[in-house]
Image (cartoon, helix red, strand yellow):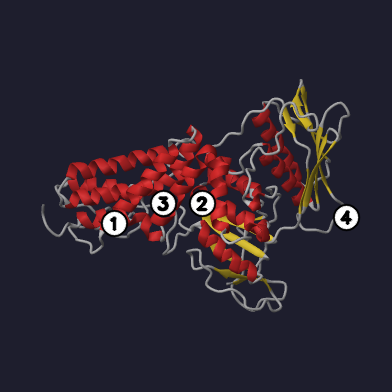
């Protein structure tokens, strides 16, 4: 795919050397209340100002507003956004350099009672604000994880002198298909992951002028089809899929695992295809783990991909960052999850097996081994959840255990049907409906409702197992297949034999 990139550049976010994936990031710059060397942002009836010059671009102004809200979440006190510093209050100063030619670089440092956030360009300044927000305790993925920051009043930031150089990938973006009411949250997440474009338009393939970027696609399943052997006179980038609505459907769960991401992006970086990166994330919620990994690789690929096993380093860091004291158990559960879903079509193996059972078609596949694999993976996930706080456990359920149950429970129902136990089969798919309701906690009500991509007989319709089995039972085995609302004619399948 050859495309001229017309990118919409936004103000964005950053992680202070999170790419090393070694230490905890969130909240790591909060000082002890007795720290005399830090800068007190909130405390003793004093709240800092956030200083932004009126002529700073909108991305910097927006970053200041987000930062003020973040500090309020943490401390209960909202800073004022002002144009000039006041000598009687501490300040966070956002300022863009006038003579730094670098692309999106930034520096954060404490000086006396001031935290200086300085960018080489306006986006770099905004990145600095988002970096500070995360290091004070705000999860950049909070819309999806449901995590709230720890409370600190007083709020003191440690002495800082941190610099971030230019990113490895120049243009970075996510392609999404979130509901309209979620679009602002998606954009905010993109900013907090330091993305700088959204859904850029393209031109048809053809003779590309020298200033064009040649964009190389993957196979819709996270493996690059090809990459440039020599850059030639053009610059190069990639279009990558974590989600896909084509043949290799990935919609309800993350199936392109960190090991594949690390291997493929090492190839991409080695080929020099780093001018542009667009990753398809569909509705984003299910793909935040790998989306964050890609965002951090795109910022500092050398650090992120160093060592022999960058993927495992990322998974271990992710578990420490998001699951705290349960990190070890979480890592074991992730390993079981990735083993169970080594290909995208495993997501609906159980649903298809139940479908075949209702049609009285014996599958050649031996399901006992897969059922045992899923039971072990589910047990590992359940064991990890028992070690977690309630918010951690809910997020882990949504991200790991729920996709396992979406395959395991229909598979158990299929086995029960083959043993002529309708009641047990119905109980299994009813349990799946309850699991869907648990995953649809606020604000995700009706998230997995039937839509044009999760419709009727489609395997990725999570309600298909329950609806098909209910139809089968209520018609005494005469019907089970669901109508396709997109079909021009409606047909009903009858089972090949009576019960």
Q: Of helix, strand and loop, which one carries label 3?
A: helix
Label 1 crowd bin: few (<14), some (14–19), many (20+), radius 10 Å: few
Separation of marks 1 and 4 at Cα, in angstroms:
63 Å
Q: Is residue 204 above or below residue 176?
A: below
Q: Nearer the viewer, mark 2 or mark 1?
A: 1
Please name the residue that numbered disc 3 is placed on. Answer: 336
Q: Which residue is mark 4?
A: 99
Kindly identify which numbered label has been placed on residue 287: 2
Q: Which mark is residue 282?
A: none
Question: Can you tell which of label 1 and label 4 is closer to the viewer?
Answer: 1
Proximity of marks 2 and 1: CB atoms separated by less than 8 Å: no
Q: Secondary structure at mark 1?
A: helix
Looking at this rendering, what residue extends furthest in the top direction? 45
Tell which circle, 2 or 1, labels the residue nearer the N-terminal end: 2
- Mark 1 vs 3, N-terminal side: 3
Q: Are marks 4 and 2 in contact (CB under 8 Å)?
A: no
Which quarter of the image is occupied by the N terminus? bottom right
- Label 2 vs label 3: CA separation? 18 Å
Q: Image point 61% across, 31% down: which residue?
A: 150
| Number of marks in picture | 4
Give the mark nearer the N terminus: 1 vs 4.
4
User: 126 or 386: nearer the eye?
Assistant: 386
| Residue underneath mark 1 | 369
**Secondary element at tag 4:** loop
Which of the pair 177/359 is nearer the observer? 359
Mark 2–mark 1 Cα distance, whole angstroms, equals: 27 Å
């Amino acid at each position: 795919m050859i495309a001229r990139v017309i990118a919409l550049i936004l103000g964005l976010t950053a992680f202070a050397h999170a790419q090393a994936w070694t230490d905890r990031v969130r909240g790591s710059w909060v000082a002890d209340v007795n720290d005399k060397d830090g800068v007190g942002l909130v405390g003793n009836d004093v709240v800092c100002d956030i200083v932004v010059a009126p002529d700073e671009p909108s991305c910097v102004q927006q970053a200041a507003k987000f930062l003020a809200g973040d500090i309020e979440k943490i401390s209960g006190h909202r800073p004022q956004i002002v144009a000039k510093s006041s000598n009687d209050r501490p300040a966070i100063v956002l300022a863009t350099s006038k003579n730094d030619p670098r692309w999106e670089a930034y520096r954060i440092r404490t000086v006396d009672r001031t935290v200086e956030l300085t960018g080489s360009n306006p986006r770099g300044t905004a990145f600095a604000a988002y970096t500070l927000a995360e290091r004070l305790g705000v999860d950049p993925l909070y819309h999806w994880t449901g995590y709230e920051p720890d409370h600190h009043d007083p709020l003191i930031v440690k002495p800082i002198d941190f610099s971030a150089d230019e990113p490895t990938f120049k243009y970075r973006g996510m392609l999404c298909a979130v509901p309209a009411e979620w679009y602002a949250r998606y954009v905010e997440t993109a900013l907090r992951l330091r993305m700088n474009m959204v859904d850029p338009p393209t031109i048809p393939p053809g003779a590309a002028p020298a200033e064009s970027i040649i964009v190389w696609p993957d196979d819709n399943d996270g493996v690059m089809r090809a990459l440039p052997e020599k850059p030639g006179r053009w610059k190069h980038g990639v279009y990558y899929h974590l989600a896909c609505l084509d043949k290799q459907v990935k919609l309800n769960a993350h199936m392109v695992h960190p090991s594949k991401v690390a291997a493929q992006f090492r190839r991409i970086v080695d080929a020099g295809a780093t001018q542009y990166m667009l990753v398809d994330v569909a509705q984003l919620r299910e793909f935040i783990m790998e989306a964050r990994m890609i965002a951090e690789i795109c910022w500092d690929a050398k650090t992120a991909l160093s060592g022999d096993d960058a993927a495992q380093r990322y998974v271990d860091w992710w578990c420490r960052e998001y699951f705290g004291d349960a990190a070890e158990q979480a890592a074991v559960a992730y390993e079981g999850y990735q083993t169970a879903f080594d290909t995208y079509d495993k997501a609906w193996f159980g649903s298809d097996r139940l479908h075949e059972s209702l049609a009285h078609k014996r599958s050649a596949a031996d399901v006992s081994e897969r059922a045992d694999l899923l039971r072990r993976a589910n047990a590992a996930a359940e064991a990890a959840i028992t070690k977690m706080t309630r918010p951690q456990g809910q997020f882990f359920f949504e991200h790991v255990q729920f996709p396992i149950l979406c395959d395991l429970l229909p598979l158990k129902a299929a086995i029960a049907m083959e043993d002529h136990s309708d009641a047990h089969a119905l109980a299994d798919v009813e349990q799946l409906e309850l699991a869907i309701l648990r995953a649809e906690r606020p604000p995700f009500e009706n998230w997995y409702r039937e839509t044009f991509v999760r419709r009727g007989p489609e395997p990725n319709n999570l309600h298909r197992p329950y609806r098909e089995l209910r139809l089968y039972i209520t018609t005494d085995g005469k019907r089970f297949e669901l109508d396709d609302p997109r079909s021009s004619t409606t047909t009903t399948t009858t089972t090949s034999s009576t019960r």
